[in-house]
Amino acid sequence: MLHRVPAGSMLFDQAETPTFAQILLSGSVELLGVRDQIETLVELLRPVDLVIPAAVISGQPI
């Protein structure tokens, strides 16, 4: 299934348990950590890359 997501969209939130893996085909994804309203860049993904594969496989929250 192909999803097109506008720039600036939130794909998932911290502490969510993902139900499926996402493959980045174009653009980029920033994985941000937020604490006390301060954002920290954890990882920058570029095509072709899997988004949160470990959380999907283990069934654990992000």
Image (cartoon, rainbow, N blue to C red):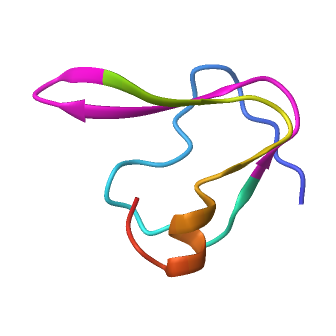
Residue 17, by quadrant, is bottom left
Q: Give the percent coordinates (x, y) of residue 53.
A: 63, 62
* Residue nearer the viewer, 9 or 42: 42
Q: Give the percent coordinates (x, y) of residue 40.
A: 32, 23
Point out the image quarter for the N terminus: bottom right
Q: Residue furthest left?
A: 36
Q: Is 60 within the magenta?
A: no
Point out the image quarter for the C terminus: bottom left
Residue 24 appears left or right of 28:
right
* Residue nearer the viewer, 50 or 10: 50
**Which residue sits at x=58%, y=71%?**
56
Q: Is residue 51 above or below residue 43?
A: below
Q: Is residue 39 above or below residue 59?
A: above
Numbered label tally: 0
Give the residues drawn in magenta, as a range: 23-39
* Residue nearer the viewer, 41 or 7: 41
Q: Is residue 48 above or below residue 28?
A: below
Q: Give the percent coordinates (x, y) of residue 24.
A: 79, 41
**Which residue sits at x=86%, y=29%?**
26
Main SS, magenta residues: strand
Q: Give the percent coordinates (x, y) of residue 46.
A: 75, 29
**Which residue sits at x=83%, y=33%?**
47
Q: Is 37 within the magenta?
A: yes
**Which residue sits at x=57%, y=21%?**
8
